[in-house]
Amino acid sequence: MDLKIAPSILSADFGRLNEDIATIDDYIDYIHIDVMDGHFVPNLTFGAPIVKYVKSGNPLDVHLMVENPENYIDDFADIGTSVLTFHYEAVEDCLWLISKIKEKGMKVGISIKPGTKVEVLEEFLSKLDWVLVMSVEPGFGGQSFMPVALEKIKWLREKALDINIAVDGGVNAETGALCRQAGANVLVAGSYIFKAEDRIAAIKSLRG
Ligand code: DX5
Ligand code: ZN
């Protein structure tokens, strides 16, 4: 599958978010939006009323790190979200939530934390557009890549040839190459891109 780069705006300057996005918008494939509620993860970011003002020519890839993700489906659909990803650990009935998100016309993804076994996703794979493998504990940017993600990516790619496999956390040129080799085709990167002196060179280095 084509490689896609999804910069996480968590590491951008929120005071000049759209200017920051404009510096890279022609070189990327998605905008990755980290929504945190202070419950599912010990950090708080923003919801749809703010994300609505994000300006980009690229589709929005929304990563919900929240409890009760079902409460936010309508709001993110209304602002034009392309891919809506929820956490396996936050939900009791994943099948129900998958169909709710699809009914709203969005692509659907499930994410798993580093401590969650990838096999739990097997029963959902045929219904998913996207799997997001966390390679750090969700909640903060700037952490180091956890290699446990690589085995999960390999397992997923063997099971699901036609699904988008995204990896999120500590992705840079080196860890990104390992993820690509393992079978990931979406690289999410926050600090590696937004804190780089040359953001475009950083994006190109992720493409290999
Ligand atoms: C972490 C978020 C990530 C984060 C990645 O909970 O899901 O998207 O922004 O940041 P880096 O690339 O700096 O590890
Ligand atoms: Zn994320």
Image (cartoon, grey):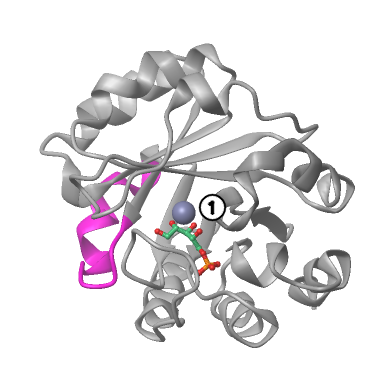
Q: Is residue 62 left or right of residue 195?
A: left
Q: Which residues are magenta?
A: 112-126
The quadrant where residue 114 appears? bottom left
Q: Residue at x 79, y 66 (%)?
A: 203
Position of residue 13 measured from the top left corner of the image (x, y, whole percent): 65, 50
Q: Position of residue 69 (x, y in %)?
A: 26, 31
Q: Is residue 94 magenta?
A: no
Q: Quadrant of residue 202?
A: bottom right
- Viewer-side residue, 33 vs 133: 33
Camera-side residue of 159 and 95 = 95
Q: Please provide percent x and percent y for residue 108.
A: 44, 35
Residue 81 visible (yes or no): no
> Which residue matches tag 1?
10
Amino acid carrying mark 1 in the image: Leu
SS at mark 1 in the image = helix
* Mark 1 surroundings within 10 Å by alpha-carbon count, few (fewer than 14), some (14 through 19), many (20 or more): many
How many marks the image carries: the answer is 1
Q: Name the residue nearer the viewer: 100 or 30.
A: 30
